[in-house]
């Protein structure tokens, strides 16, 4: 039996989702993967980094988090104010970085991931910022230190698109990607296709928790841009800046445009795309596109996401699945954790 | 740089497809995976097993195969009449087993795979027979000897469904699977949906090479049954016999039924499925099913395949892609080969 000492830094929805799976999947991990995962440390922005040598009580942690009580109330823990100090002091095997995405400078995730890798700790992350802005540096650092850095959940949550592109079709040359990479905007556009106005649907999505109070990151396409940057780096080996992605959100899509498209047997979707132009330069775009309804992407409704890629050996492959959610995102981290465990002797 | 000494046993369409990729992807394998693949031996049923210590000339082999000339015309080779004798004598690293599928006793693939594993050789295979009939034995043998046995191409060619189910969503509990797992029947049903008769479309599919002269394996559902057996074993850990799969082919689907379904906004597809009944017993079926057109599976046309699964942590995930073809199947073997190389020190 292999044992992995896991640290979760960032204990919001995603970090809690992973913790919940680590607890509920204990038996499965032992039986299927001969793997014991001990959650030994957890950090959030409010209460710093806590550590317990023999493992933390996950149900208790989830309870404390739900009640917004300090994680330091967990008995028998030692603490550090800064997650990175705690990580380096305790020497865990794997860091699950799950702090919030920041597309300006990727902090604090960037420092956590860089620091962990520099100190021999494998990293799995759901944080889009560091991978979108610095995949090249971080992947290089991991390779240099012979460590794993995995990020399944940064694109389409636990729906396995990153592992498919990097491992499932290893050896194929991917030529283009396009996808519905943001569930909030797809929910809004799907609802508008039934004849409703943007503002109405947005308000409803906010009420149901599918859209945030400030919906800018979603409806202006910034979230999809982050995912396109990640795919550009991981699949095409190219580091693009956010301003190199041609970006148009959905705020100017009108009900009339939606209905006109429907009458023509078409659908308007917010599509992120990566493809080569005639000069073999990689083009990156996020924009509303009118698709014929026979295309699989046109059929993706509500909060579901989908990604289509073309490769030299495979014509076209499409993956459809959830793109967000507590357990869905936790699942991506769990798969990453299992993949890391396979590389540990 | 890692070097893998590869043997391809079975040098028909699939084996040749892999050889072609090994040749054309040399540079990519070096750059992306730090991997050198030397094709040192090849066998077919006509000419036995040939071996060349310093690697075979792949373009020459493909030329000999295309002209149906004996592979032994390749200069500087030593030969064995039986592939297994050659394999064991030469001690290659990886066997690519690509002989034809036989669902009665899985031979000769079964003996090749078993023999290779018993002698310390990793195996990748596109041959459905041994995995459909004996996955449990063969996976156990591989595990015992600490060897890899991979079979991406046995279901949906190189479209990565096996790696997705086993690795991409590792940790998730898959609850059900359904899929369009045979391109020939989907091509026929798609064409019938435009108002044509089964017999007409079958004749056309045969003329175009999408259906074989004896189409029984496809149109009666046996090929899909093999894939359902493989998924039952790999995903649910259950060894089923072919006669435990409820099977109905497409030969009795009429044009009138197709058109009736269309009028109701539905499509008839040959669906392979695995799910648990109310007594938690795994049910396996292959049969024509009428699907509402909003379902992604209903939209899959022509020779494309698709598989949908439900998992506890992911709701529903669907993968759409090619299910056959020389390079498409070779791609699955190539991805398997790269995965094996990652486990070799």
Image (spheres, coloured by chain):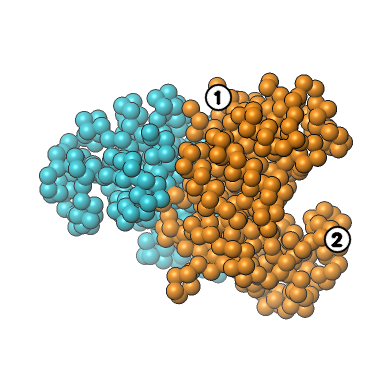
Chain colours: A cyan, B orange
Task: Indicate the quadrant containing the N terminus of chain A: top left, top right, bottom left or bottom right.
Answer: top left
Q: Residue at x 39, y 39 (%)?
A: A341
Q: Residue at x 23, y 41 (%)?
A: A41
Q: Which mark is residue A36?
A: none
Q: B222 or A277, which is in the foreground?
A: B222
Identify the chain of the residue marked 2, using the numbered disc in the image.
B
Q: Quadrant of residue B114?
A: top right
Where's residue B174, x and y in %? Answer: 47, 59
Badges 1 and 2, same chain:
yes
10 Å crowding of disc 1: few (<14), some (14-19), many (20+)? few
Q: A11 or A340, which is in the foreground?
A: A340
10 Å crowding of disc 2: few (<14), some (14-19), many (20+)? some
Q: Which mark is residue B204?
A: 2
Q: Residue at x 60, y 60 (%)?
A: B228
Task: Indicate the quadrant containing the C terminus of chain A: top left, top right, bottom left or bottom right.
Answer: top left
Q: Which mark is residue B2?
A: 1
Quote the CA–CA distance across marks 1 and 2: 47 Å
Where's residue A191, x and y in %? Answer: 51, 66
Image-based side of A153 in relation to A39, left or right? right
Q: B264 or A173, which is in the foreground?
A: A173
Image-based side of A61 in relation to B25, left or right? left
Q: Is residue B249 visible?
A: yes
Q: B127 or B322, which is in the foreground?
A: B127
Where's residue A303, x and y in %? Answer: 48, 60
Identify the chain of the residue marked 1, using the numbered disc in the image.
B
Label 1 sits on a secondary structure element that is strand
* Relative vertical location of residue B8 with respect to residue B294 in this rendering, above or below: above
Q: Residue at x 64, y 45 (%)?
A: B111
């Amino acid at each position: 039996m292999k044992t992995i000492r896991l640290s979760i830094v960032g204990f919001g929805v995603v970090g809690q989702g992973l913790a919940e799976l680590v607890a509920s999947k204990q038996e499965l991990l032992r039986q299927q993967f001969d793997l014991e995962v001990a959650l030994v440390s957890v950090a959030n922005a409010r209460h710093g980094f806590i550590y317990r040598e023999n493992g933390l009580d996950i149900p208790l942690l989830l309870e404390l988090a739900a009640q917004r009580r300090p994680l330091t109330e967990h008995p028998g823990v030692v603490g550090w104010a800064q997650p990175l100090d705690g990580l380096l002091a305790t020497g865990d095997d794997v860091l699950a970085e799950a702090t919030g995405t920041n597309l300006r400078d990727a902090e604090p995730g960037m420092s956590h991931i860089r620091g962990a890798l520099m100190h021999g700790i494998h990293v799995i992350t759901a944080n889009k910022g560091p991978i979108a802005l610095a995949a090249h540096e971080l992947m290089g650092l991991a390779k240099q230190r012979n460590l794993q850095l995995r990020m399944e959940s940064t694109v389409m949550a636990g729906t396995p698109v990153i592992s498919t592109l990097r491992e499932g079709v290893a050896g194929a040359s991917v030529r283009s990607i396009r996808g519905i990479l943001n569930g909030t905007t797809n929910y809004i556009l799907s609802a508008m296709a039934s004849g409703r106005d943007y503002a109405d649907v947005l308000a409803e999505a906010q009420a149901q928790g599918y859209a945030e109070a400030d919906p800018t990151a979603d409806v202006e396409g910034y979230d999809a841009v982050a995912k396109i940057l990640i795919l550009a780096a991981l699949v095409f080996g190219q580091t693009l800046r956010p301003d190199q992605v041609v970006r148009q959100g959905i705020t100017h899509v009108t009900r009339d445009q939606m209905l006109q498209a429907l009458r023509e047997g078409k659908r308007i979707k917010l599509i992120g795309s990566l493809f080569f132009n005639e000069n073999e330069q990689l083009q990156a775009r996020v924009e509303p596109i009118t698709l014929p309804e026979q295309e699989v992407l046109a059929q993706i409704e509500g909060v579901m996401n989908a990604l289509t890629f073309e490769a030299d050996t495979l014509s076209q492959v499409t993956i459809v699945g959830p793109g967000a959610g507590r357990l869905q995102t936790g699942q991506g981290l769990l798969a990453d954790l299992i993949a890391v465990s396979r590389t540990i002797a």
